[in-house]
Amino acid sequence: MTQIKFGTDGWRGLIADDFTFDNVRRVAGAIASYVLKHEDPTRGVIIGYDTRFLSDRAARAVAQVIADAGVPVLLANDYVPTPAVSYNVKKLGAAGGVMVTSSHNPWNWNGVKFKAKFGGSATPAIMKLIEEELAANAMPSGHSPAKIEEVDLKPAYVEAICQFADLNLIRKANFKFAIDSMYGSGRGVLPGIFDKNGIQYVAIRQEVNPLFPGINPEPILPHVALLQETVVKERCHAGLVTDGDADRIGAVAEDGSFVDSHKCMCVLLNWLLVYKKWPGDVVRAFNTTGMMDRIAAKYGRKLYECNIGFKYIADLMMDHEILIGGEESGGIGYGRFLPERDGILNALLLANVMAEEKKPLGQLVADLQREFGAHYYGRRDLHISDEIKNGAIRRAADPQTTKLGAYSILRKENRDGVKFYLDAPKHGNGADAWVLFRASGTEDMLRCYVEAATPELVEQILESGERFVRQN
């Protein structure tokens, strides 16, 4: 029997290898058993799915298992963004939500996410309970089958996120946007909002194509190349891109340059503090920019650093008043809305920032770099054997490892992976140079993350990091 391993946000596997209907039903059985034991099953479960191969049929299989366990099901009648499932879970008071998706993974992956009753990524404690049910091969039976009802999950969600953005202000600013859904389940949502409110845009990759031709549906380089070209060709003031299930954001500046998730988070954080003045503290994942620390400090907000995976941010949102929480992969959420990341909401809010400050996106980023110092970021995904991967992590953690290439290691942190702070050149109040080595929670790879004060330095440290990983 295939071992099913939960990563940072549910289970993912290769279609037809790990992601099979048998395994999907096993996961659904574990979720049904969790709901029966730990939630009010009469509240039902909401199920959605993305545009991947077999997602709709897998969602139907999940619905059948859960309904056969006596738990009512609301099943999406169309492809739907993950945050739309989360929003409806909270709005309707459901016992939980299931999303069939593999998010940003390549076309031949699929998976299952579980959303807790509070409308966000299940906490580590909840995931542990579901994993225990899975290990016990739970498959509840003996109940009277409950009803499966198909519903449109999008209208209520769209209405809710539109309350957070000043769409009239965005229209009046007369900016033009390029919208890229990467063939994912955010298709048509942002264009529909912009159409209704008279906001100028061009849209690309809105059609359903489960092969995601030429890309992984992840809003980072090089997969955003078509969006970059579109922004320049169509003379847009920004490009806004969401991933395969529309819970992550990426962006492109008016000159076609990529704006990574770190910069998006900082633009949004600064706007919230200066213009909105919403209360709350700030939380960021272990592999994200130190610029957030500087912005939070300027405005007297406490900053929490957490492990990688939005469920850890959601956990903090349960216990603290959190203004904004963000992760490296483009997941950004707000305590006053949902403890959940939301790419479409963040696209609207980035447009709102531009309209309020009357500046295109690249200028907003440049302003922050001037005020808080130059911060540049890079990442390499190294597909290597377990032997090399585990050896690299061991050597990184070893106290005898005191240098990385030409750079001395000033200190190490072992919170989630191994992070080196390096004695590297710094320009004024620019970024402290650091590199983080971490094994992926969902794929066979080791990721190397770097932040430093110049793009050239980022590349040099990435090179040194890769050499360190691959050495015997």
Image (tube, helix red, strand yellow):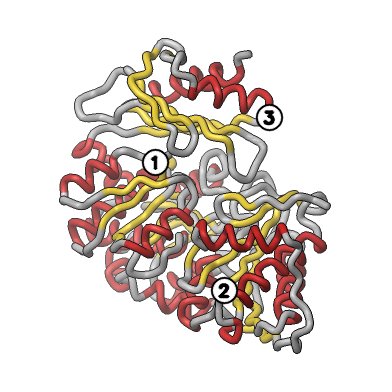
The answer to whether residue 71 is seen in the rendering is: yes
In primary-sequence order, the first of circles 2 and 1 is 2
Circle 1 sits on which residue?
288
Residue 324 location, quadrant = bottom left
Q: Nearer the viewer, residue 327 or 104?
A: 327
In primary-sequence order, the first of circles 3 and 1 is 1
Q: CA distance from mark 3 to mark 1?
A: 25 Å
> Residue 219, labelled with which disc?
none
Going 36% across and 48% down the picture, which residue do you hit?
284
Q: Are marks 2 and 3 in contact (CB under 8 Å)?
A: no
Q: Position of residue 101 (x, y in %)?
A: 64, 60
Position of the C terminus by quadrant: top right
Q: Nearer the viewer, residue 232 or 371?
A: 371
In primary-sequence order, the first of circles 2 and 3 is 2
Q: With respect to residue 344, does 3 lie above or below?
A: above
- 131 with respect to 235 (left or right): right
Q: CA distance from mark 2 to mark 1?
A: 34 Å
> Residue 386, labelled with which disc?
3
Secondary structure found at label 3: helix
Q: CA distance from mark 2 to mark 3?
A: 37 Å
